[in-house]
Image: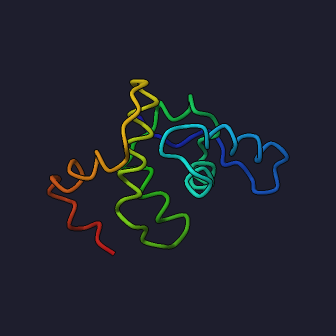
């Protein structure tokens, strides 16, 4: 299942501030990450349940034209984990998971 949400929230949307505020209440989500999630089309905490950290990271890099720090994947993994299980874990708990993957070397800057 693709994590691609139904719509990207436009920067000029009057609802953007309230959506951003709701996302910032999630563990591991600050203003910059909330903006990234909105850019990816995740506009509610519930929408993150269908997220895929790999797809989210690759799309973020593609949409921004920038190769983001691979730790962004760790943050996405922690956020999706929380959405699916309700368990709050620190983003760095997922760093070893990412680094253990054989394709991790391709994520370097």
- Decide which of 38, 31 is in the foreground and name it: 31
Where is residue 108 shown, x and y percent of the image?
A: 29, 71
Q: Quadrant of the C terminus?
A: bottom left
Q: Quadrant of the N terminus?
A: top left
Where is residue 102 shown, x and y percent of the image?
A: 14, 57
Residue drawn at x 43%, y 24% is 86
Q: Residue furthest top?
A: 85
> Above or below — where is 64 with respect to 80?
below
Residue 71, by quadrant, is: bottom left
Q: Residue furthest right?
A: 14
Q: Is residue 4 left or right of residue 58?
A: right
Q: Which of the colour schemes (rainbow, by chain, secondary structure, one colour) is used?
A: rainbow
Q: Is residue 77 left or right of residue 17?
A: left
The number of callouts visible is: 0
> Above or below — where is 45 with respect to 33?
above
Residue drawn at x 41%, y 57% is 72
Where is residue 69 shown, x and y percent of the image?
A: 39, 67
> Above or below — where is 83 with respect to 65?
above
Residue drawn at x 76%, y 47% is 16
Residue drawn at x 20%, y 51% is 96
Where is residue 65 shown, x and y percent of the image?
A: 51, 72
- Decide which of 76, 31 is in the foreground and name it: 31
């Amino acid at each position: 299942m693709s994590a691609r949400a139904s719509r990207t929230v436009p920067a000029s949307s009057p609802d953007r501030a309230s959506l951003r505020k709701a996302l910032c209440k999630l563990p591991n989500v600050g203003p910059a990450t909330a903006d990234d999630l909105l850019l990816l089309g995740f506009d509610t905490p519930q929408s993150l349940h269908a997220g895929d950290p790999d797809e989210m990271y690759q799309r973020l890099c593609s949409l921004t034209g920038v190769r983001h720090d691979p730790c962004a994947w760790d943050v996405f993994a922690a956020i999706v984990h929380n959405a699916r299980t309700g368990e709050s874990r620190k983003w760095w708990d997922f760093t070893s998971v990412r680094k253990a993957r054989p394709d991790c070397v391709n994520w370097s800057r």
